[in-house]
Amino acid sequence: MKKLIFILFIISLILMPKPSFTLSCVEPSPPDIAFDEYDAVIIGIVVNIKENHNEKILTIAVDTSFKGVDENFITVKEDITWGSSKLNKGYLYYLNKEGENWIHPLCSPTTDHTYIAEEFFADKETITLQNVEVDENGSEYGIFVALLAVIVVIVLTLLLIKKRKKK
């Protein structure tokens, strides 16, 4: 009985295989259709990349915004394994917004062929960008300040304990 089940299982694998699309995306929409599917469409250059657990935090200098972004610098979260953004390279990004964060979806039609924007978005009005300063080392600075504060508290506590023991 076990042999019969095993043989039927093997035959079913051979005769009726189902195609698998593991970690592959459906064919992306053309740029003009994708424009309506995403919260933001921009051309920008990646000026900084930080890795944080399972994501990359990209700092993007926005050159042109066709939709959704009105700042000259934004931070975008991208999957660390499947994200393909490279430092100092320009891209036509299609982004979504989750809460206050910009997300670069895995299957968006983002491309480094920024020239296609001229063809597909020539009739779109661009958004005037506001100057926003970006502190690329802000998180490291905050950690440094917090660590320094903890050290100061420990030293003061030890001095107080030592002073009380002398009395």
Image: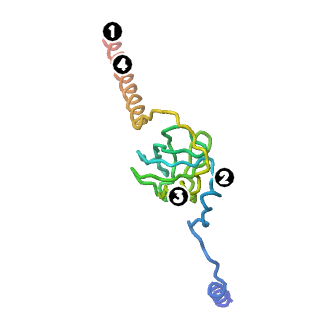
Q: Residues within 10 Å of mark 2 (few under 14, many from 20)?
A: few
Q: Amino acid at mark 3?
A: Ile
Look at 50% across and 41% down and name the residue there.
Answer: 74
| Numbered label attached to residue 116 | 3
Residue 46 versus residue 148: which sits nearer the camera?
46
Ranked by sequence position, the earlier of labels 2 and 4 is: 2
In depth, the one of 151 and 100 nearer the eye is 100
Side (left or right) of 62 relative to 164? right
Q: Position of residue 117 (x, y in %)?
A: 54, 54
Q: Name the residue type under label 4.
A: Leu
- The tag on residue 156 is 4
Residue designated by label 1: 167
Query: Which numbered mark, 4 or 3, is in the foreground of this view?
Result: 3
Q: How many marks?
A: 4
Q: Residues within 10 Å of mark 1 (few under 14, many from 20)?
A: few
Where is residue 5? Give x, y as percent: 67, 86
Label 1 or label 3, whichever lies nearer to me, is: 3
Image-based side of 58 in relation to 104, left or right: left
Above or below 50: residue 163 = above
Determine the CA span between mark 4 and mark 1.
17 Å
Q: Which mark is residue 36?
A: 2
Q: Position of residue 57 (x, y in %)?
A: 47, 46
Picture quadrant of residue 141: top left
